[in-house]
């Protein structure tokens, strides 16, 4: 029953988002539309979140009829310092989503009103512990963009539709389901527009089920961890999956990530707030992780989960400093300039805690190519850092049909061998895409834990054998493929062919007789 209710709520939410998309169609391209919807949803969320907190405190203090939305800005000022310290942000009553929306239709300067509200929210956080988390957070919601309309009046009409559409979304009781509702809206928008997202940069949105598998593998055997890290965190879905699986309070020192794309970086920070991760429990940075990593002082990390961009270009040995970088120098060689994949692997390994696990989605080519990549694989195997390689099915990711792999890294393994799992057949077909079902995920995780040899599925291989195979880490090298073609009985087949040939001869003779009779008749 609960599940039905949840599905109903989810469908209702998706319908509401489609309806807003319909209203704005043609003026705002999908990827931009996502930023507007999420930004305004975030504005609604923090407005209601703050209002509820202040109202609860006042009602507890005996002020039964108190309503923060009705308070004057002057009277509200006294709560500012306390709210910034506890929640990380503050909004004046006149600037709350609820009140701005109420006045929106009659506000000829709505675009300026919103711009000023967003600036104030950022300004109030300045000088506090949450300053970095709010700086530039609303930059992607350009209320003066021509994409919204050619004139101020047209832009404002679109903004009214946005405020109303998001204001009418049924997000339920905040205590019960807010976070799920926002998370679902976010994921729905991401999948709606995933095919537009950064494909040229080798980036692919990580589907829910792949996130689930990756994170479950990385937290096997743990009920709590010190920190979770993603060096290419995108919108933060993998970090939040760890929060969901372990419980956010069981990640003691919080969630760390770095993202090179400014839009996605902003969405990631918004996503943290939407999932109720407090500002002092996350640290998301913006820069190129390979060249300018921002968390030197926070490593090592007990859990690392990542789906880094596939085969992107990087400076590599064009930059003489990198070969001496402690993250890359142990392998004695840098990942090729045209393929940074193994640079992400080396970075993650370097920042992994001794008792930690890193689970990273990889492009299959890095498992078998020669040159510098082979030398890095040799370093990983000879030092016994590769715990497991999992071959995933093709067509799992939006925007690419590539069959990816997962590489699992550990620094403290008990045996000098590597587990290979062929999960290429573990999927259910949903329209054009394949999807990992719960039973597929369970089957992979179970064998990952047991490390058992299972015919056509998994094999624990001594690292000496991997060395003999030229440090090839492709799963198909070690796990035998099941032959699904029908077995043919050659003796029986020959007998059947003989019979067919004999019958063919009889028919030829019959035809010859008929032709001879016809010719005689003529």
Image (cartoon, rainbow, N blue to C red):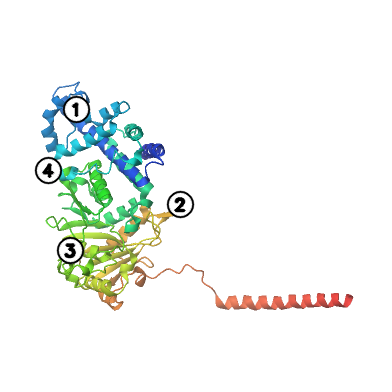
* Drawn side of residue 30 relative to residue 333, left or right: right
Q: Are marks 4 and 1 in contact (CB under 8 Å)?
A: no
Q: Where 301 falls versus 155 (above or below)?
A: below
- Which residue in the rendered view is the most extreme toward the front? 151
Which residue occupies the extreme right position in the image? 521
Reading the image, the residue beneath label 2 is 431
Residue 40's tag is: none
Q: Which-is-in-front pick, marks 2 and 4? A: 4
Name the residue that disc number 4 marks. Answer: 129
x then y, percent, for residue 485: 49, 68
Quadrant location, the C terminus: bottom right
Residue denoted by label 1: 55
User: Can residue 333 be seen?
Assistant: yes
Residue 183 location, x and y as percent?
30, 43
Q: Position of residue 20 (x, y in %)?
A: 38, 37
Q: Are marks 1 and 2 in contact (CB under 8 Å)?
A: no
Separation of disc 3 and disc 2 at Cα? 40 Å
**Distance between mark 4 and mark 3 Cα atoms:** 28 Å
Discs 3, 2 touching: Cβ within 8 Å: no
- Of pointers 4 and 1, the one earlier in the residue sequence: 1
Numbered mark located on residue 350 in the image: 3
Q: Looking at the picture, tell me which residue is in the foreground, 456 or 255.
A: 255
* 452 to 183, vertically: above or below: below
Give the left or right position of residue 15, taking residue 301 as reference.
Answer: right
Q: Which of the marked residues, 2 or 4, is nearer the chain's N terminus?
A: 4
Q: Residue at x 14, y 43 (%)?
A: 131
Which mark is nearer the camera, 4 or 1?
Answer: 4
């Amino acid at each position: 029953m609960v599940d039905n209710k949840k599905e109903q709520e989810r469908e209702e939410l998706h319908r509401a988002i489609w309806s807003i998309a319909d209203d704005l169609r043609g003026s705002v391209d999908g990827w931009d539309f996502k930023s507007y919807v999420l930004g305004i949803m975030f504005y609604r969320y923090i407005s209601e979140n703050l209002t509820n907190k202040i109202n609860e405190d006042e009602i507890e203090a005996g002020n039964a009829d108190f309503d923060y939305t009705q308070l004057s800005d002057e009277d509200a000022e006294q709560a500012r310092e306390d709210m910034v310290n506890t929640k990380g942000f503050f909004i004046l009553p006149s600037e709350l989503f609820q009140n701005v929306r109420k006045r929106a239709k009659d506000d000829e300067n709505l675009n300026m009103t919103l711009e000023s509200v967003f600036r104030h929210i950022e300004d109030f956080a300045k000088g506090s512990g949450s300053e970095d988390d709010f700086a530039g957070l609303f930059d992607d919601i350009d209320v003066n963009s021509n994409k919204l309309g050619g004139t101020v009046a047209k832009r404002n009409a679109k903004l009214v539709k946005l405020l109303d559409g998001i204001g009418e979304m049924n997000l339920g009781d905040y205590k019960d389901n807010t976070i799920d509702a926002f998370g679902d809206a976010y994921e729905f928008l991401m999948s709606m527009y995933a095919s537009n997202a950064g494909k040229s940069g080798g980036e692919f949105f990580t589907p829910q089920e792949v996130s689930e598998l990756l994170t479950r593998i990385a937290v096997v055997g743990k009920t709590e961890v010190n920190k979770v890290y993603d060096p290419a965190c995108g919108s933060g879905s993998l970090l939040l999956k760890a929060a969901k699986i372990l419980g956010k309070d069981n990640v003691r020192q919080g969630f760390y990530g770095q993202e090179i794309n400014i839009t996605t970086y902003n969405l990631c920070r918004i996503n943290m707030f939407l999932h109720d991760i407090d500002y002092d429990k996350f640290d998301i940075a913006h820069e190129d992780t390979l060249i300018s990593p921002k968390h030197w002082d926070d490593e090592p990390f007990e859990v690392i989960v990542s789906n880094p961009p596939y085969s992107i270009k990087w400076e590599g040995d064009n930059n003489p400093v990198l070969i001496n970088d402690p993250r890359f120098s142990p392998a004695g060689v840098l990942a090729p300039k045209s393929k940074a994949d193994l640079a992400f692997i080396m970075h993650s390994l370097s920042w992994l805690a001794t008792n930690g696990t890193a689970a990273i989605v990889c492009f299959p080519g890095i498992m078998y190519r020669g040159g510098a990549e082979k030398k890095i694989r040799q370093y990983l195997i000879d030092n016994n850092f590769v715990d497991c390689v999992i071959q995933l099915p093709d067509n799992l990711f939006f925007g690419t049909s590539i069959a990816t792999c997962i590489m699992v890294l550990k620094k403290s393994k008990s045996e000098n061998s590597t587990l290979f799992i062929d999960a290429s057949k573990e999927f259910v077909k949903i329209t054009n895409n394949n999807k990992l079902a719960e039973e597929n995920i369970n089957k992979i995780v179970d064998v990952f834990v047991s490390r058992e040899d299972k015919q056509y599925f998994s094999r624990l291989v001594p690292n000496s054998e991997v060395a003999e195979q030229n440090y090839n880490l492709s799963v198909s090298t070690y796990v035998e493929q099941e032959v699904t073609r029908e077995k043919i009985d050659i003796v029986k087949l020959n007998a059947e062919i003989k019979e067919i040939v004999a019958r063919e001869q009889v028919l030829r003779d019959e035809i010859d007789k008929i032709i001879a009779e016809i010719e005689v008749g003529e």
